[in-house]
Amino acid sequence: MNMNTKPENNREEITGRNYVTRRFASPYPAFVALAIAAALFPNPAVGQLKLESLNANGRLTWNDPGGTGTHYAVQWTTAELTNWYSWQDAQARLSGLGPTGSVYVPMFYRMVSPDPTYHSNAYYSYFEGLPAFNPITPLETNEMRITFMGSMIPLPVRRAQAEMSVFVEVGWTPDPKDTYYQGRAVDQFVFDCGAGVSANYAASVVGFRRMDKVFINHLHGDHMSDLTHIYTFGPSGDRKSPLYVFGQGPSGLESPTNSTIYYDDGVSNFCAHLREACRWHSESFSFQPTRYTNYVAPTRLSWGLPHDPVPVSNDTYDDAYAMVPITLNWRNVGVAYHNPETRAKVTHYPVIHARKGSMGYMLEWTPPGATKPLTMIYSSDTKPETNSVNLACNGTNGVDVFIHEMVVPPTVWAYKQMGLDAPPADTNSAAYASYLAAVNQLSLVQDSSHTPQGAYGYLLSQISPPPRLAVATHFPVADDTVASAFNSVQAHCTNIVFGKDIVWSFDQMVLRVFPDRVVQCRAVVSDYAWNPPVQLPTNGMYAPKYNDGKGNGDPYAQIDQSTSYSQTNNNGTVNWRSDGY
Ligand SMILES: [Zn+2]
Ligand SMILES: [Zn+2]
């Protein structure tokens, strides 16, 4: 590819003065060539950097009327991979090169594009290039479908990326009576449910009924915040049955060491308190029915659980406001769920993250007629460790989809959190001092709890056979961060192909896993979605807890109406209409 190649992507125009090609979405990046201009944007009127040429090997020639050392041009290419992995590497090589020059440049942090609306830190072009997909499409009978409902590391919750949640459905049972979904998945699983993910579930028209089994990898807020929403509003939607929450047993840690204080920080106590914290909500909405007359509760045997499923409070076993924790022994690899009817099995395993108790999960599901299961691993948050790798090797079978977390380097993390796209320029400034302090803090966070970009590549290099698709998640994606990350991964996995062997997750990315292939798509959803239609049986519900004695729900039982305006006056005039108009 050279500078005169006709662009194939809608933002690959090569026109006018800025000459930058971007070939990132599809086909996969034989070549990504870009430039950054550290001092370009603050005062673009003075001395625009002009890139004169850029050849297929990444040889960049420029003219920089702004002066020596003010601009840094950086490019990333699979053909010319060198040892530049960071802004500093690029800066060291490029500063002071003079107003004109020519150099091989391997990586970027900011692109210069002829598209004035383009910012490399505000697009994830690869995702945008994926084929569109309607999330209401019935699954194939041999399909495992993985949808990213959240994909972000905190902080923040992004509008583009909610915090973590991975929704997985397997198989399909058609149902002609279901006029909306046309049937249902054989089984389904919510892995983590951090802040903001509820909007993505609603946009993907996933009703609460399909979110009744939540597997929490660890009890950080970015992995469980939206449990409150799922729990409280499920019974107002189509989950008229209990919520099952799988998670860690207590850490057993003295907190802190030598304090003689031990907290019950496991999922059971978490659920017990959450359930009571939501008491006002659950009572107030219990004028609506919350129990099927024919609900068949799962048992330890039927779901292959490590213990009997028991609600945390005095809710009956079949009530939609019953919260049922399933406590997993985080110290061991063990079975969290193994349903012989649906042929789905979830294995939990210890990872290393923040505090003892964090777990990863592996899901295996054997399609009808198949001998070999489809397999998925979701590590959630962890520093590099051996369990994820061992399970991903899966004997010698490998796994279909390996979803593992990744963090940007502490330097990038620090300056991005300062609202910058590079470290503060003045190394004597207060801003630079706080940048260094942040780098220091974030290095501690990374080293104790997370997987750096290069370490992700190292992990992949240890997995044999390699996963059919590796997915980096819990990662703030944009073209700049992803290109940098891929570069670091490639250093360990020279032949790895972006888009084919590895991708970075994004909200509404859908992976359709079949025995012979993994298909990547982009769910097209509405930002104005309502919940999917609630389709409940017309009978077969117990009378609501608050009822009028005749089986009808009584929404007035819990309010004091003494200050209420009446709709009509004694003389018959109307104050307000009860039909809403
Ligand atoms: Zn965490
Ligand atoms: Zn996290």
Image (cartoon, rainbow, N blue to C red):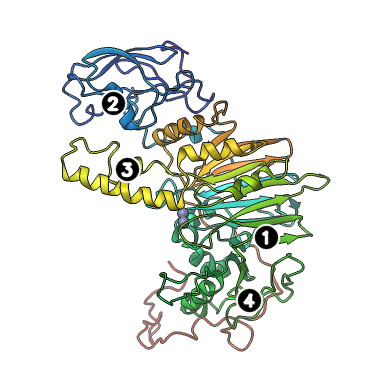
* Secondary structure category for the residue under label 2: helix
Q: Are marks 4 and 1 in contact (CB under 8 Å)?
A: no
Q: Which amino acid type corresponds to the residue marked 2 in the rendered image? A: Ala
Comparing marks 4 and 1, which lies closer to the viewer?
1
Query: Residue at position x 20%, y 31% from top?
Result: 42
What is the spatial separation of the Cα atoms under label 4 and label 1, in whole angstroms?
Answer: 29 Å
First-in-chain label (4 vs 1): 4
What is the spatial separation of the Cα atoms under label 2 and label 3, in whole angstroms?
Answer: 20 Å
Observer-nearest of 561 and 359: 359
- Looking at the image, the residue that sits furthest to the front is 258
Q: Which amino acid type corresponds to the residue marked 4 in the rendered image? A: Asp
Query: Residue at position x 48%, y 45% from top?
Result: 451
Q: Position of residue 168 (x, y in %)?
A: 63, 51
What is the spatial separation of the Cα atoms under label 1 and label 2, in whole angstroms?
Answer: 49 Å
Q: Reply above or below: 426 against 299.
A: above
Whether residue 521 appears in this view of the structure is: no
Q: Is the residue marked by circle 3 packed among few (<14), some (14-19), or many (20+) residues within 10 Å?
A: some
Q: Reply above or below: 281 against 357.
A: below
Observer-nearest of 448 and 365: 448
Q: Are marks 3 and 1 in contact (CB under 8 Å)?
A: no
Q: Are marks 4 and 3 in contact (CB under 8 Å)?
A: no
Whether residue 57 appears in this view of the structure is: yes
Residue that carries the numbered disc 4 in the rendered image = 319
Residue that carries the numbered disc 2 in the rendered image = 92
Comparing marks 2 and 4, which lies closer to the viewer?
2
Q: Position of residue 154 (x, y in %)?
A: 40, 52
Query: Residue at position x 71%, y 44% from top?
Result: 143
Residue that carries the numbered disc 3 in the rendered image = 416
What is the spatial separation of the Cα atoms under label 4 and label 3, in whole angstroms?
Answer: 46 Å
Indicate which disc residue 334 carries: 1
First-in-chain label (4 vs 3): 4
Q: Which amino acid type corresponds to the residue marked 3 in the rendered image? A: Lys
